[in-house]
Amino acid sequence: MKKVDKTLGIVTMLLFTALLLVVIIQILSRYFPYDFMWTEELSRYLFVYSIVTAAPLALRKQEFIRVDLLIERLSDRVRKIYESVISTMILLFSIVLFIYGIQLVSLGSDFYAPTLGFSMSYTYAAVPLLAILLMIYSVVYIIDQFTGKNQDEEGEQI
């Protein structure tokens, strides 16, 4: 999983860097006679895909916002069971998200992005891709809970 984590981290950084560059182009185009109408649309798609690649990493490293006042008072065994139940719920939600995401992708084949001109299926493919990544990371987190592996032991830097 280290290689998958690192790959997702690199892809996320590349997407976010591209997003920043597109937004800078959009801002600069206001002061020049050139009008880049595609920048708003492309920035939206880059943002969506950067979230798709970053969310599984946040799940793996437990960086989502959560209230852990009560969780910290639980014993280690009960805490592991609690965390596994939460990951199972995320897994079940991801399965539902994947099913409906596939339907969304098929709907998008008839529509095209207004300024960029590509099929919206590529944009809507972010939903099932996110679902697949969340499914994988949920299962890995549950396995890590009961095998004693900890994300901190595997290396903090992604």
Image (cartoon, rainbow, N blue to C red):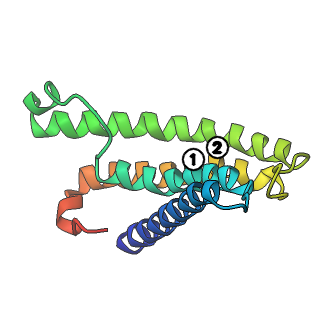
Q: Find disc 1 in the rendering and name its residue.
A: 131
Per the image, the residue denoted by label 2 is 98
Are there few (<14), some (14-19), or many (20+) residues within 10 Å of tag 2? many
Indicate left or right for 30 with 53 as reference: right
Tell which of 72 and 32 is nearer to you.
32
Q: Who comes first in sequence, dot 2 or dot 1?
A: 2
Establish if 85 lies above or below 37: above
Q: Secondary structure at mark 1?
A: helix
- Quadrant location, the N terminus: bottom left
For image coordinates 50% across by 60% down, the residue present is: 20
Residue 113, percent from left and from top? 81, 50
Q: Nearer the viewer, residue 75 or 126?
A: 126
Q: Is residue 46 above or below residue 14?
A: above
Residue 85, x across and y down, in percent: 35, 34
Residue under the point 44% across and 49% down: 55
Q: Which mark is residue 32?
A: none
Q: Amino acid at mark 2?
A: Phe
* Quadrant of image for the C terminus: bottom left
148, above or below 90, in the image = below
Indicate the secondary structure of the residue bearing disc 2.
Answer: helix
Residue 83 in the figure: left or right of residue 120: left
Residue shown at the point (14%, 24%) measured from the top left: 70
